[in-house]
Amino acid sequence: MWRSIPILLLISISSTVMFTLIAISANQYTASFIDTEISNWFSVVENVFPQVMSWISFFGSGEVLMILTALLMLWLSLKKKAYAQTLFVAVVMGGGVLLNLGLKFLFQRGRPEDSSYFEVFGYTFEWVSYSFPSGHAMRAFLFWALIIHLIWLYVRHTRTKIIFSLLFVLLILFIGSSRVLLDAHFPTDILAAFAISLAWLTLCLAGFRIYYEKRLRKEQRENLKMRENLCGRS
């Protein structure tokens, strides 16, 4: 277990560096060179299936993922009795939302279109909605990556794990692409969201693994001490 922790921390640090480089390249109010180049690639299909793009984007919306996260936590706690995994999901998703809001207010990048307000369950709030990094992309990355993580924990068949993992990776990529095609975000908003989400997820995984390794060692020391006490009494 310990051997995987340095790898997780290395991925987290590398992803943070990547996020920083993207943030430096991104202009505050206009499209950067990277945005322009990627947008040119997308321009070929931007008018194809706009309704499909809206539906794909829907699977990264705050309302949908809020409900799915609650259902996932209920399933883990009530069905699987996996309270540690329930806490892990809460930390990853809750922390990810707070991280996204903090970064948005730090960079305060305007959107491609002046969609400046915050909408939840059909209600619009007078709260400026900044563009960088994309909230849709961050939420989608974190939630569906958590689903992949749980699939590898609970599903036995390797082929099933691989198939569903690839499907959810494609869903994450499609959600990110849909935000660009719908003119809700610049491409660098999406790339930055993916980078910082990977950094946050791997940091959380490393933190939880360190905690469980310490708890396991503590339990082993207590069991050893108990056996020594029993042997001493006999």
Image (cartoon, grey):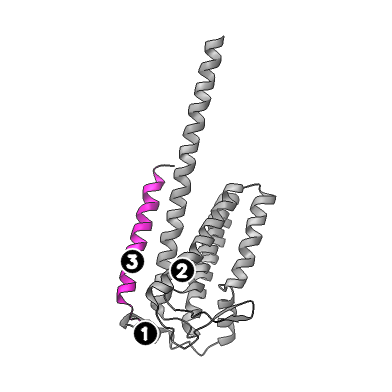
Q: How far apart, in angstroms, are the residues tagged by discs 1 and 3? A: 21 Å
Position of residue 2 relative to residue 16, above or below, is above
Residue 51 in the image, given as x and y percentages of width and height: 59, 85
Please say whether residue 15 is one of the residues in the magenta stretch: yes
Please tell me the numbered disc located at residue 29. 1
Stretch of the chain drawn in magenta: 1-29
Q: Earlier in the sequence, mark 2 or mark 1?
A: 1
Q: Amino acid at mark 2?
A: Asn
Q: Secondary structure at mark 3?
A: helix
Mark sitting earlier along the chain (1/3): 3
Residue visible at 42% across and 73% down in the picture: 105
Return the disc, 2 or 3, that comes first in the chain's sequence.
3
Task: Give the farthest residue toward the right.
Answer: 79
Asked whether 145 or 156 is in front, the reply is: 145
Task: Kindly report which numbered mark, 2 or 3, lies closer to the viewer in this rendering.
Answer: 2
For disc 2, the marked residue is: 100
Residue type at tag 3: Met
Q: Residues within 10 Å of mark 3 (few under 14, many from 20)?
A: some
Q: Is residue 181 above or below residue 143?
A: below
